[in-house]
Amino acid sequence: MQIDIVSLITIFILAVFVGNEIINKVPPTLHTPLMSGSNAISGIAIVGAILAILVDGGEISKYIGLAALICATINVVGGFLVTDRMLKMFKKK
Amino acid sequence: MEPIQITNILYLFSAIAFILGIKRLSHPKTARSGNLLSSLGMLIAVIATLTYPGKEFDFTLILAGVAIGAVIGLIFATRVQMTEMPQMVAIFNGLGGAASAFVASSEFLSSPNSPFIIVCLSVFIGSLTFTGSFIAFGKLQGFISGRAITFKGQQAINAIIALLSISIILAPGLFFESSIYAGYLNAFYIVIALALLLGIGLTIPIGGADMPVVISLLNSYSGIAAAATGFLINNNALIISGSLVGASGLILTNIMCKGMNRSLANVIFGAVGAETSGGGSEGGKEINIKSYSTTEAAMILDAAEKIIIVPGYGLAVAQAQHVAREVAESLETMGKKVLYAIHPVAGRMPGHMNVLLAEANVSYDVLKDLDEINPEFEDCDVALILGANDVVNPAARHDQSSPIYGMPILNVDKSRTVIINKRSMNPGFAGVQNELFGYDNSIMVFGDAKDMLNDLLKEVKEL
């Protein structure tokens, strides 16, 4: 697969700008859920982990992929659940 | 349409879900649905990956990995106490960094022709995030000293490690037999080892009060590591999500630094909060404090009309958020106005106090941030300080020799009376004695926040 580094950098820069726009609007009250929620999103490495676990891949890289998968899944599942647990508590009387 | 295009369109959907999900976090009413949307985005990304064209996956192993990870994540997420949330976030950051580093390593070991600089960048940031986060976790959990740990030449060592890593990443040929895979492999292992060391070296000198900055920064790193890995495996989902998280962490880091009026460099290299012997600006100054009982404190509160509660890390340590809310409610039923003042760096991570008080069922609209609450102290009868210290130290406004000089603080001293609850007279995490305690309008009520508030609750109810 031909890697087009310029389009990848374009995507990266634009995503940083989008991130800046939306995150600046998050109020201080929700900074902890923002952090744990965005942390769960960084568990997107789960995608890379799955792609590393191939039948025809080498044994070593396969098991390193498994380690990545376990870490990333903890991050994703734990991150989203704990964020939800927190957000459930934010109430206005 | 080619199958790979369908995969990429699904990745686009998941990116949109993440962006809209974070956008909905801008209000407590929509926040929960936003988080749900983000998790849906993750599900789409996983499904898209499992159907990736031209790849033959080892599904047994994948299922096993997901099952193990999901169970551990579930246990963590449901068992953790709200007061331990900073530790939890630190662990998750560390695992995110580790995951990215593992993915990049796996890629490098299976296809040695991968661009070496990107491989190294990704394992470097990922490994540094991993050890940095676990040191932060250890400090927050009390496994290692929460104070800044410093020694001579510490920064020189960190600088050498960083420079060495950069040179190996940029020019492995200078150090090892160039263009031979074995040489690159050695360079790769050394880069990992150096990054793991640097993560420890950079986090260990950071004191407890600076933790909010470090946690946000590590959060950012975990995103950048994912984005770097995205470049390596040519995957849009990783690049977009990683950059979003990277940006989010950097913005929070910036907000936290502003909250302390310090530069990021000063937080990372300043080592504020180290054990200092004698020194310090207030070292020689005697302050006379007035120690009151809870009965007397209750009588002062009885005469007050407007009360502002200032929570700090001490409240979290004592798990006193629930009883604090009960005291506030009793005072409200007596017709008094009660507000909460939340300093941006109160606690050990951004928004720490807000989460604790939300857990205790305090309505989020009575939690006021610095700019909103400071004018309120002018006509406030009692400021009740629960386990906060440096964020209410008036020295930050006028004492140029104080390490916290210039930090925006809550102007509690403008209130008619300041009631300060503290365990003892130990200085705060910045290691600075608080001159507020000696002010004419300040009174101290010593004791554990939870015990003190329980006593106070009884007294207030008897009024």
Image (spheres, coloured by chain):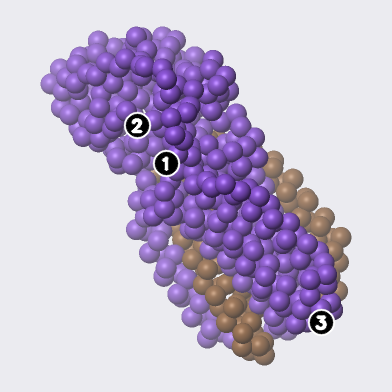
Query: Label for residue B355?
Result: 1
CA neighbours of label 1 inside 10 A, class few (<14), some (14 to 19), many (20+): many
Structural distance between the alpha carbons of marks 3 and 2: 59 Å
Chain identity of mark 2: B
Residue B435 location in percent, x, y?
Answer: 41, 18
Q: Quadrant of the C terminus of chain B?
A: top left
Q: In this rendering, which labeled residue sits more in front, label 3 or label 1?
A: 3
Residue B51: x, y in percent?
A: 65, 78
Asked if badges 3 and 2 are on one and the same chain, I answer yes
Q: Earlier in the sequence, mark 3 or mark 1?
A: 3
Q: Secondary structure at mark 1?
A: helix
Residue found at x 32% / y 28%: B425
Residue B180's label in the rendered image is 3
Numbered badge on residue B426: 2
The image shows residue B458, relative to residue B113, as above or below, that is above
Q: Residue B422: where, in percent of width, then height?
A: 30, 29
Residue drawn at the location 69% of the way across and 55% of the way down:
B160
Tell me the colour chain A is drawn in: brown
Identity, as a three-letter code, of the amino acid under mark 3: Ile
Quadrant, the N terminus of chain B: bottom right
Q: Quadrant of residue B306?
A: top left
Q: Amino acid at mark 2?
A: Asn
Q: Which chain is purple?
A: B
- Establish if A89 lies above or below B326: below
Secondary structure category for the residue under label 2: loop
The alpha-carbon separation of the residues under discs 2 and 1 comes to 26 Å
Q: Residue at x 81, y 64 (%)?
A: B170
